Amino acid sequence: MTRVLQISDTHLSPAKRHFAANWAPLHDWIVRQHAELTIHTGDLTVDGADVEEDMRAGAALMHALPGAFLAVPGNHDVGEPGNPHQPVNAERLDRWRRHFQADWWSHDLENWRLIGLDSMLCGSGGDEESRQLDWLERAMSTAGGRSIAWFTHRPLFIESPDEADTGYWSVKPAPRKRLLDLIRRHRVALVATGHLHKWRDTEVDGCRYIWCASSGFLVGPDNQPDMPGEKRLGAVLYEFDGANVSVTMVDVPGLTTLWIDDVLHEVYPPRHAA
Ligand SMILES: [Fe+2]
Ligand SMILES: [Fe+2]
């Protein structure tokens, strides 16, 4: 049996310390788990997309954790397709890769192949997006009978695989369809994501979709539409055993329930087109 932790949406920054108090309890919990691997599913930083020091400090914290560490970037780490202020681009991807080596990866354990995907490339339309898709096809087709689990930041959909564009909250319908085709073709068993700052465990068409809670903050109704899932902070424990897995949502002791709505104007001030 192999223990793996998923943490997400820590939103850490040495300059903007609004959620910093929740790092110590999360760190202490990780140390107590004696897991083989910790996976961070993005929005590791407040603004690594533009602030080198956020990325440097965040990487230092993660690389000091016990056990192996892997991460995929969130929109606040590398920008996102279609964002006029912070598009995902070569400079931002390069910053992430300098500090975290890779934004997509595969890692085999037990009878599983874990695949980390950079969802910020989905719909970005450049070489990087097709390079990741080519690599993903290979990583899946060479899995050799292993069960497959994906880890990425942005969920593929909120309520249903064929829903329309949900805007900020999930992958756009065109890139989503390509990923869902792969999920069906290769019978992907599990897709684990972050971004929503909500906990959910649901099964759709034979694939289990896990929304990992944020350990940083919750988002109130003024800034997040009504959608499924539970607003609570925490992390996820996976116990992989042969071709099986058990998934447990964990309330991490000592986390303070913080709300972005109270500090949004300081942490993410509104931007105006120049
Ligand atoms: Fe986030
Ligand atoms: Fe996000």
Image (cartoon, grey):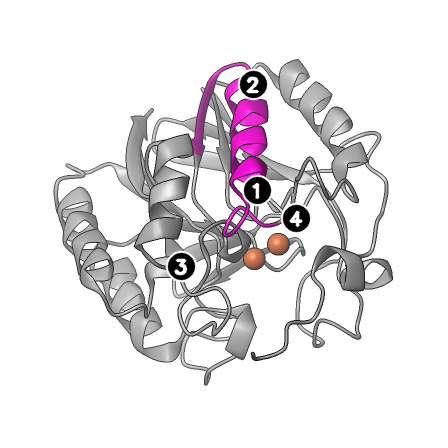
Q: How many marks?
A: 4
First along the sequence among labels 4 and 3: 3
Residue 185 seen from this side: yes
**Mark 3 — residue?**
120
Compared with 266, 147 (above or below) is above
Do the CB atoms of the residues marked 4 and 3 lie less than 8 Å apart?
A: no
Q: Spatial distance from mark 4 to mark 1, Cα to Cα?
A: 13 Å
What's the residue type where badge 4 is placed? Ala
Residue at mark 1: C-beta within 8 A of ligand 1? no
Look at discs 4 and 1 and give the one toward the viewer.
Answer: 1
The kind of residue on which mark 2 rests is Leu
- The percent position of residue 28, horizontal first and vertical second, equals 72, 19
Label 4 beta carbon less than 8 Å to ligand 1:
no
Residue at the spot of label 2 = 65
* Residue 214, x across and y down, in percent: 67, 47
Query: Residues under labels 2 and 3: Cα distance?
Result: 25 Å
Please state, as top left, top right, bottom left or bottom right, where the N terminus lies in the image.
Answer: top left
Q: In the image, what residue type sits under mark 3? A: Met
Which comes before the other along the chain, label 1 or label 3? 1
Residue 44 bears which disc, if any?
1
How would you rate the neighbour count of disc 1 (Cα within 10 Å): few for under 14, some for 14-19, many for 20 or more?
A: many
In the image, which residues are magenta? 47-70
Q: Quadrant of residue 148?
A: top left
Residue of label 4: 213
Comes first in the chain, label 4 or label 1: 1
Which comes before the other along the chain, label 2 or label 1?
1
| Residue 192, placed above or below residue 242 | below
Residue ID at (54%, 26%): 62
